[in-house]
Amino acid sequence: MELYVHIPFCIRKCRYCDFLSFAAGDEVKEAYKDALVREIRGEQGKDSRGVSSVFFGGGTPSLLPEAWMGEIMQALRESFRIEEDAEISLECNPGTLTQGKLLAYREMGINRLSIGLQSADDRELKLLGRIHSWAMFCESYTLAREAGFSNVNVDLMSALPGQTVESWRETLRKVLALEPEHLSAYSLIIEEGTPFYEAYGEDARRREAGDEPRFLPSEDAERQMYEDTKTLLGEAGYHRYEISNYAREGLECRHNVGYWERVDYLGLGLGASSLSQGRRFHNTNQMERYLQGNFEKEDVQVLTRKEQMEETMFLGLRLTKGVSLEAFRRKFGESCEAVYGPVLEKLTGQGLLKVEDGNVALTDHGVDVSNYCMAEFLL
């Protein structure tokens, strides 16, 4: 099984972000840390399975003092059976890391960092509402290496307002020169309820309708950024293992892969979601209730066999290796071909799907229209 630990605090919320995150004072942060430790300890003895990965997400987990992170890690180790070789990842942002924090993370067993850069262009960073510059990112990255971190991911974002194909290429070149082990490269989505939606929502709708956008890159430019990402990262020795994720061989994010393969995971913290033994549920997203100790699981959904089949396909197909036909048969007692024969035949005939080496996977063209392909697997 896996653990996800949510730290919802940021110095300032980015203009594009719709995650459960916000700024808060030190008193609220400390109260949250104490509540989180109580929730973790309340899980002690409930699940004896080994934990293969722990992921601290946010928000900005690196905002918390290292002593508080130490308390959380100690509670996790005393409440769960964390495997000796578990991947323990922490999301962090430039401007929130210090040498002392990084050395403390190493000491407490955190062995993977995910640093949110988004762009190497300071003008683009300012537009996004990021708190850092390219120079600050480089400083944080150097500190991480000096502290001994040998597994580092860098988050990047393309199709930004005003971004050009060349400025995206330059971001890729600059980051590749640093030789991180992993890169996550996402295309910006304009989410409702964000400042970006107010500023660029109409522009996004224009582009979807095939009209020329005023501020966002054109559809052709966005497509070129997507192709450049595959080409430049591939030439640099990174293999694409998931639609938006690239890694050196053997350094794929275990937590991510587990999510797409529907490995059970327990979410801890405000609003955190879980998948456990065929059920999906989440914690309260109301801070006041959480601080009062309301750790009850909300919106518990017992997944039917049909729903589990659907999830297996439309989550698993995000991985470039696809879905194992043998694993499908073992899990559900019948073959994928028996359940999805017409869909497999249709998408294979359209050149969107391939069946090889015992797996069913999207072709390169299938990845380009992945939303269409995955919708076909809804029974």
Image (cartoon, rainbow, N blue to C red):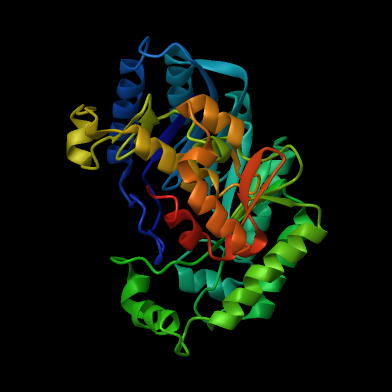
Closest to the observer, 292 or 70: 292
Indicate the position of residue 100 as horizontal and vertical percent values: 60, 35
What residue appears at the point 60 percent right and 66 percent down from the top-left corner?
Answer: 119
Q: How many marks?
A: 0
Q: Residue at x 58, y 76 (%)?
A: 222
On screen, residue 197 versus residue 222, left or right, reads left
Q: Residue at x 53, y 69 (%)?
A: 125
Left or right: residue 71 compared with residue 109: left
Q: In the depicted view, which residue is nearer to us: 26 or 256?
A: 256
Question: Residue 4 in the image: x percent, y percent?
Answer: 44, 33
Name the quadrant containing residue 283. top left
What's the residue at 55%, 51% (across, down)? 344
**Residue 24 position (above or below residue 282):** below
Residue 210 to residue 332: above or below: below
Q: Is residue 255 above or below residue 120?
A: above
Image coords of residue 21 (percent x, y): 35, 50
**Foreground: 334 or 100?**
334
User: Image quarter for residue 16?
Assistant: bottom left
Q: Is residue 61 shown to the viewer in this render?
A: no
The answer to whether one can see residue 65 in this image is: yes
Q: Position of residue 375 (x, y in %)?
A: 42, 56
